[in-house]
Image (spheres, helix red, strand yellow):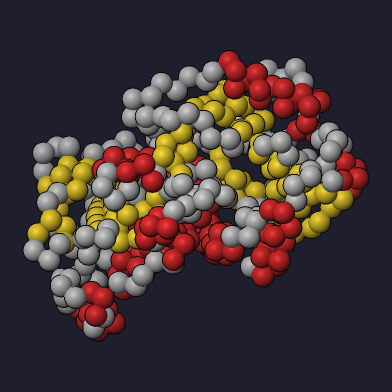
Amino acid sequence: MKRIPRRSFLESCAAATALGGSPLLKGWVPMSKQRHVVVVGAGAFGGWTALHLLRRGARVTLVDAWGPGNSRASSGGETRVIRGTYGPRAIYTHLTARALQLWKENERRWHRQLYHPIGVLWLVENDEAYEKAALPLLKEAGLAFEELSGAETARRYPQINCEQVRWAIFENDAGYLTARRACAAVLEGFLAEGGEYRQLAAEPGPQVAGAELRGIKLSDGTTLAADAFVFACGPWLGRLFPDVIGDRVRATRQEVFFFGTPPGDQRFTEQALPVWADHGRGFIYGIPGNEWRGFKVADDTRGPPFDPTTGERLPTPAVLQSAREYLAFRFPGLKDAPLVEARVCQYENSPDEHFIVDRHPATANLWLVGGGSGHGFKHGPAVGELVAKLVLTGEAAPPEFRLSRFDAGATPRR
């Protein structure tokens, strides 16, 4: 079991001076002692949070029940889209820009490719308000993009049936990320830099004087004590904190399909096509190639409620048929493409689809992080950076992410 090396005496004193005087940290362990933080959940949010905490000088223990990117995890599977178009929600466009920098930096550090910059093409039909609102924010965040007419889109990508497509956004800096592989890379980097990882189930232990949490209960019967705790456990967050989160994180069943392209046909590979996001009658997206995995098609429509622990993960004929019909319409050359793989995963969104990043209202040293599935994976490095800063400085989260927003109700819109 790996532990991080002790920092030098001078480094520890500097950290104590920088953080010890904050009134927001009243009652916390003095910074003359290296702060120990436990992070529960090794997915996109938890893994990156643990790594950033470690790099900021904390001693960090990362805990996960089944391992990073496992088959039950919301951060599992092969690929995820990285894109900056978020309608009028500027906070996510700017988070994407920061996350993109961090993905690139850590790729260079680890000497492995996780980010595939093949671009993202947004196909716009009649309802264009979402995409129109995104254009000035993409520019503001420094994310390169082009506006294409429907005719230009059809000429550039003849393998796409552009019927009803009025115009499109092509995001040059966007693309896709290898999900399961990235989760493993973050853990490897975390361990290499001195972090500690334990593969056990966890639940919060009792509070102590001053409404602080002093330990979590592990599935091996032991208790793990620390100075601060971060629970970033995806669809299980509501179950672990029913009074504070409850159904504010809702797991839904989502089906993803990979279709086989014709042998030797380059038209449907990532060399010839970008990621696409089809904002028409619904919202369907896909990724070509997927490192030879197949032509990915997924419907963003929320599925039925799903239990991520006990739920069976077999695709249903009706959803598969819908995916085939879409493929035949938008990509006629793949009309009879065989299904080569399918996956059932889950989303775990909040009612307004904003992330949840906030301190537990009754527990000063406990942070809750979640509600990101369906669009949070790309933001993992930037969210982890933010959470690490909040935990170690005692600052408040951005208002969009705070639990108090639910007091006024929440309107879904991503």
In the rendered image, the vertical position of residue 412 relative to residue 96, given as above or below: above
Q: Can you give x and y, in whole percent of width and height, for residue 187 in the image?
A: 37, 49
- Res. 357 in view: no
Question: Image point 68% across, 17% down: which residue?
Answer: 338
Question: Image point 59% across, 60% down: which residue?
Answer: 89
Q: Can you give x and y, in whole percent of width and height, for residue 395 in the image?
A: 34, 72
Question: Image point 59% across, 37% down: which residue?
Answer: 300
**In the foreground, 394 or 5:** 394
In the rendered image, the vertical position of residue 322 relative to residue 361, given as above or below: above
- Res. 94 in view: yes
Q: Is residue 116 left or right of residue 204?
A: right
Q: Would you identify the image quadrant in which residue 38 lies?
A: bottom left
**In the foreground, 30 or 212:** 212
The mark total stands at 0
Q: Is residue 175 left or right of residue 359?
A: right
Q: Is residue 42 left or right of residue 86?
A: left
Q: Would you identify the image quadrant in which residue 59 lies?
A: bottom left
Question: Image point 9% across, 59% down: which residue?
Answer: 208
Q: Is residue 309 left or right of residue 61?
A: right
Residue at the farthest front position? 408
In the rendered image, the vertical position of residue 349 relative to residue 91, given as above or below: above
Q: Can you give x and y, in whole percent of width and height, for residue 372 in the image?
A: 46, 48
Q: Can you give x and y, in whole percent of width and height, for residue 158 in the image?
A: 87, 37
Residue at the farthest left position? 209
